[in-house]
């Protein structure tokens, strides 16, 4: 049994999504019966989906998007690379400063010594440094 949403904004968002699905179906000239058959649900489930009923499964939504040729919209939904809030939170968690690297201490045997890397423009060096 689905629990009815208490959030008015969430309910409105689902109603808008349902209306958008209905509009997309009509623009593609797909009947409710044909849409239901292609999704694998009953006609009444399609009607509930298009009304924004919160009890319709996410699998039904995914199949509807697949039939409409819009399945990429689901896989791109809240993608980490385009999630502005997530990116902002990542940026805020970055360190404020970074300490420079320290050279390792020589071992107790005295055989292994840390050799500093030359900062000069040596012709023998290859690659790019940061």
Image (cartoon, helix red, strand yellow):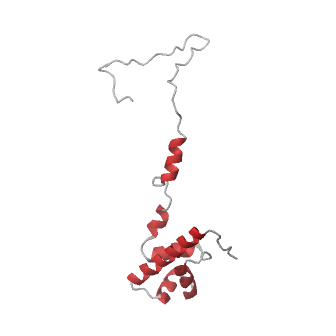
Residue at x 29% of width, y 20% of height? 123
Q: Image quadrant for the N terminus?
A: bottom right
Residue at x 49% of width, y 66% of height? 74
**Observer able to see residue 63:** no
Q: Residue furthest front?
A: 8
Residue at x 42% of width, y 74% of height? 69
Residue 130 placement: quadrant:
top left
| Residue 121 point in image, percent of width and height | 31, 19
| Residue 75 point in image, percent of width and height | 48, 63
Image mark count: 0
In this rendering, the answer to whether 12 lies above or below 87 is: below
**Observer able to see residue 73:** yes
| Residue 11 point in image, percent of width and height | 58, 72
Residue at x 43% of width, y 76% of height? 68
In this rendering, the answer to whether 10 lies above or below 122 is: below
In screen coordinates, is 125 left or right of 66? left
Of 97 and 67, the residue lying toward us: 97
Q: Residue furthest top?
A: 110
Q: Residue furthest left?
A: 123
In screen coordinates, is 89 left or right of 129? right
In this rendering, the answer to whether 66 lies above or below 43 is: above
| Residue 22 point in image, percent of width and height | 46, 81
């Amino acid at each position: 049994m689905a629990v009815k949403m208490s959030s008015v904004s969430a309910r409105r968002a689902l109603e808008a999504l349902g209306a958008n699905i209905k509009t997309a179906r009509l623009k593609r000239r797909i009947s409710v019966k044909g849409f239901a058959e292609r999704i694998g649900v009953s006609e009444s489930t399609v009607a509930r989906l298009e009304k924004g009923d919160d009890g319709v499964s996410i699998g039904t939504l995914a199949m509807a998007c697949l039939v409409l040729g819009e399945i990429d919209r689901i896989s791109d939904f809240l993608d980490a690379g385009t999630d502005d809030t997530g990116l902002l939170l990542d940026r805020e968690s970055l360190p404020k400063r970074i300490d420079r690297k320290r050279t390792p201490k020589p071992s107790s045997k005295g055989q292994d010594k840390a050799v500093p890397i030359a900062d000069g423009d040596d012709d023998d060096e290859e690659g790019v440094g940061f």
